[in-house]
Image: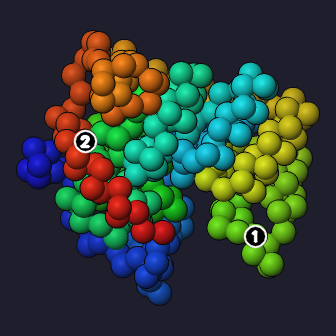
């Protein structure tokens, strides 16, 4: 047991070493054992991982690393197009931008987790993985009133040990089968990466979609403005090609999006509803997992630990 979580079924796999400054661990020179099913080295897919939409006529919209002020621009565009997406939320940013996150939830988008500090999960101990996920869930719950059941590991860095910890907590993984590479644009526009390459990638996927065995789930980001600009271009291209653009929750028909089955109205410190405060008036019909129930003051202190 760790923090009240039964980890007896979690495989014993040594944590990998992440590079200084962030990123996924480097692959070893020797083959990775198949029993590890490490996505980073070979994109191994385990039973239960979601990585595509069922039909090649579908496009699953996903956006990582928000919420940010640029998320609001994307939400405006999605509302104009009457589209829904899946947003993978960094916990510390949920604390910083709760009203934006609340807006996304209230407008019908699927909210999922993306860890607290955007760390490579295979580089963490079991206890650290629990902390990354539970702190994130608590931050999201404070903003929208429910606890997400789905997680996307940063960098797609997941193996069977990480999956085991996630499953022990009741989480499920959503990955992707197409990478727009828009993350190259997220921290400025490098001189060696042209934004047009993102739309070039998407054009190739759309051309090959009719012969694909399944639908697209694309890795995109809503943290920086250039990524949001490219997201709008991608959506217009997909719609023009008559692809059904929707959230992963919708394309997969998921109904267990949150641990709770009803939401709350967040309140500010005075008890007045403001759509994004730090207190909540609960009206849930199921029990929030005990490991999510951490103090708000703890989360506020942890928000200073975002390192990337």
Q: Residues within 10 Å of mark 2 (few under 14, many from 20)?
A: some
Front in this rendered view, residue 202 or 20:
20
Residue 230 visible? The answer is: yes
Q: Earlier in the sequence, mark 2 or mark 1?
A: 1
Residue 307 % position (x, y): 42, 68
In the picture of the structure, the residue carrying the numbered disc 1 is 189
Under tag 2, what secondary structure? helix
Residue 178: tell me if it is visible: no
Residue on which disc 2 sits: 296
Q: Is residue 194 left or right of residue 2?
A: right
Q: Residue 285's quadrant in the figure?
A: top left
- Residue at the image point whose x is 80% and y is 78% from the top: 191
Q: Residue at the bottom extreme? A: 29
Above or below, 198 relative to 236: below
The crowding category of the residue bearing disc 1, from other C-alpha atoms within 10 Å (few below 14, some 14 to 19, many at least 20), is: few
Q: Is residue 33 left or right of residue 222?
A: left
Which numbered disc, 2 or 1, marks the residue closer to the eye?
Answer: 2
Residue at 36%, 79% in the rendered image = 17
Quick check: 49 left or right of 201?
left
Q: CA distance from mark 2 to mark 1?
A: 36 Å
């Amino acid at each position: 047991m760790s923090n009240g979580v039964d980890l007896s079924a979690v495989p014993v796999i040594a944590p990998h070493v992440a590079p200084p400054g962030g990123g996924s661990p480097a692959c070893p020179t020797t083959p990775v054992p198949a029993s590890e099913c490490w996505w980073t080295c070979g994109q191994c897919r385990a039973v239960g991982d979601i990585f595509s939409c069922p039909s090649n006529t579908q496009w699953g919209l996903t956006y990582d690393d928000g919420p940010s002020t640029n998320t609001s621009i994307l939400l405006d565009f999605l509302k104009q197009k009457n589209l829904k997406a899946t947003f993978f939320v960094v916990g510390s940013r949920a604390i910083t931008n709760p009203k934006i996150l609340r807006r996304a939830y209230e407008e019908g988008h699927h909210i999922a987790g993306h860890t607290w500090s955007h760390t490579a999960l295979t580089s963490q101990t079991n206890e650290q993985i629990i902390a990354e996920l539970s702190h994130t869930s608590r931050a999201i719950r404070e903003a929208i009133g429910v606890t997400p059941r789905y997680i996307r590991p940063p960098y797609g860095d997941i193996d069977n040990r990480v999956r085991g910890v996630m499953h022990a907590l009741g989480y499920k993984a959503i990955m992707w089968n197409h990478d727009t590479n828009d993350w190259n644009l997220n921290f400025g526009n490098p001189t060696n990466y042209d934004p047009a390459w993102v739309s070039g990638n998407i054009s190739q996927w759309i051309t090959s979609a009719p012969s694909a065995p399944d639908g697209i789930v694309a890795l995109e980001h809503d943290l920086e403005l250039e990524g949001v600009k490219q997201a709008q271009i991608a959506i217009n291209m997909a719609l023009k090609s008559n692809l059904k653009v929707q959230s992963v929750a919708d394309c997969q028909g998921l109904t267990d999006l949150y641990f709770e089955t009803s939401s709350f109205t967040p309140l500010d410190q005075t008890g007045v509803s403001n759509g994004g405060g730090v207190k909540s008036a609960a009206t849930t019909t199921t029990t929030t997992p005990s490991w999510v129930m951490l103090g708000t003051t703890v989360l506020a202190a942890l928000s200073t630990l975002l390192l990337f």
